[in-house]
Image: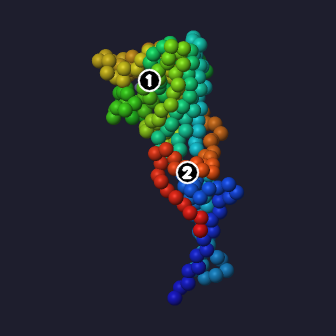
Amino acid sequence: MKLLVLSVLLAFASSANVPKKRAAYYPNVFYTSLPYLQNDGNNYEVWLTYVPVPVPTAIVELKGEGSEVSGRITFTQPQGGPVIYTGNVTGLSEGLHGFHIHEFGDVSKDCKSVGAHFNPGYTHHGGPADPYRHIGDLGNIKANAEGLAQVHDSDHLISLHGHNSIIGRSLVISANKDDYGRGGDKESLRTGNSGDTVACGAIVWIHPVRPKPPQEGESAKPEGGADTEIVEP
Ligand SMILES: [Zn+2]
């Protein structure tokens, strides 16, 4: 009868203050199986390593084109899910402004060389919740009477990796409201009649955010996340 000796070692990246519940904060598990060379190949050592994987993070610094508009938006994509984007834009006129990813990140000629809306599917313009839309169609942001737009939203089509990656592209703020392609004219299906560009910036990687383990007495369950519990042996 073949004998299989399984030695399981749990190695934690920071063992000192790690609470019992940790799955949401240590999402990737690496299994490394190494045969003992001195034996007959039936003995294995298995390492399970729970690593606090950094959340991919990108940023765009918005600068105005002939305007005082400026801002900074951060994009993160925890565990390969929807991209969460958050930040502030200031110097806007009150109301709604188109908020779109454009195909190129070249902002060397102000915002004139950023191309059209990012559209790898060659479809028409739409709203962020529409089944057919440019990948870059993130809709509108709303500025208050002081010209401040506080942005906190997520999108399921843009990504920080792969075919729909927005890295190296640009974020553009428009002068007018995006009509989501419902304006009834040609320009509506191209840009949502969102008008001139008032600010743009290139989307670039920054040092990733490391997920923080929950503190003592804090719930380990993330908002909307799975209620998974891993108990130390
Ligand atoms: Zn579009």
Structure colour scheme: rainbow
Q: Which residue is mark 1?
A: 140
Q: Which mark is residue 177?
A: none
Q: Residues within 10 Å of mark 1 (few under 14, many from 20)?
A: many
Disc 1 residue: CB within 8 Å of ligand 1: no
Q: Residues within 10 Å of mark 2 (few under 14, many from 20)?
A: many
**Tag nearer the camera, 2 or 1:** 2
Q: Marks 2 and 1, Cα distance to the nearest angstrom?
A: 33 Å
Q: Please, what secondary structure does the residue beneath circle 2 have?
A: loop
* Residue 28 seen by the camera: no
Tell me where residue 113 appears, x and y as whole percent. 54, 21
Q: Please, what secondary structure does the residue beneath circle 1 have?
A: strand
Tell me where residue 38 appears, x and y as whole percent. 67, 80
Residue plotted at (56% across, 80% down): 4
Question: What is the quadrant of residue 43 in the picture?
Answer: bottom right
Q: Which residue is mark 2?
A: 220
In the rendered structure, which disc, 2 or 1, sits on the residue that comes first in sequence? Answer: 1
Near-viewer residue (192 or 6)? 6
Near-viewer residue (161 or 89)? 89
